[in-house]
Image (cartoon, helix red, strand yellow):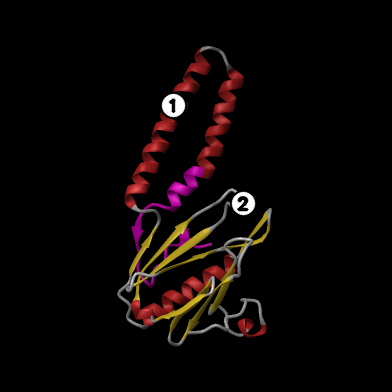
Amino acid sequence: MPTDLKEPDDDEGDHRPGLRYAYKASLIGSAHLFELADGGLSWKISGRSGVWAYGDIASVNLSFRPTSMQAHRFRADIRHKGGGRVRIVSTNWQTVSLMTPQDNGYRAFIEALHARMAAAASTAQLTGGLPSGIYAAALLFVGLLAVAMVGLLIRALMTGEHAGAIFLVGFALLFNWQIGGFIRRNRPISYTFDRLPQALLP
């Protein structure tokens, strides 16, 4: 099992674009390191390491997962046929108040991983977005909130509370930009190796 994975900006990584990726999931602990080796997906996480043959990867799920620290954040959940799982995200913790995007490196690595799996005749399940049950619950919550906001807006207009109405309109626009984008990107889908969901990649 490999233990010599390097950060993606080292000299060797510059000659192998898309084949190495690393990120820090938190300020404490070492980086999560990944490499697309000839024998499979090589990973090293918190002192554990392994190599998963591309044909033994059971599923890949891509999703859009913003946080309060980074609104433009993507995630890939990869499962092995033996039951293991690794997670790859497109951001990197640098300081207590700074989480930086790694859009180009993340996208190149995910695309190269899919290409390797396709070449290995993988039968992995490829999905995108949230699980259908969670997505349905999110839609219900957004629908109920929209009804409540429309009711408050009508009441504000009928009572002449124009400042309150303006506030509600502004809040609705902000909500649609943030939460609406999350809902639209994370619609449950299935995809193929030759057509990756662009909405779920940086």
Residue sitting at the far bottom: 38
Amino acid type shown at disc 2: Met
Could you tell me which residue is drawn at 47 percent across and 27 percent down?
149
Residue in view at x 46 percent, y 62 percent:
198
* Tag 1 secondary structure: helix
Viewer-nearest of discs 1 and 2: 2
Residue 112 is situated, as x and y percent measured from the top left of the image, at 47, 77
Q: Start and end of the magenta stretch?
A: 179-202
Q: Quadrant of residue 142?
A: top left
- Point out residue 86 in the picture as x, y percentages from the top left corner: 45, 68
- Residue positioned 55% across, 29% down in the render: 169
For the residues labelled 1 and 2, the Cα–Cα distance comes to 28 Å
Label 1 is placed on what type of residue?
Ala
The correct choice, above or below, for 101 with respect to 156 in the image is: below
- Up the image or down, 140 lies above or below 12; here it is above
- Is residue 1 shown above or below 188? below
Does residue 50 belong to the magenta stretch? no
Residue that carries the numbered disc 2 in the rendered image: 69
Quarter occupied by residue 163: top right
Few, some or many residues within 10 Å of mark 2 (<14, 14–19, 20+): some
Q: Is residue 58 left or right of residue 47?
A: left
Name the residue tied to disc 1: 148
How many marks the image carries: the answer is 2
As for residue 194 lying within the magenta part, the answer is yes
Q: Earlier in the sequence, mark 1 or mark 2?
A: 2
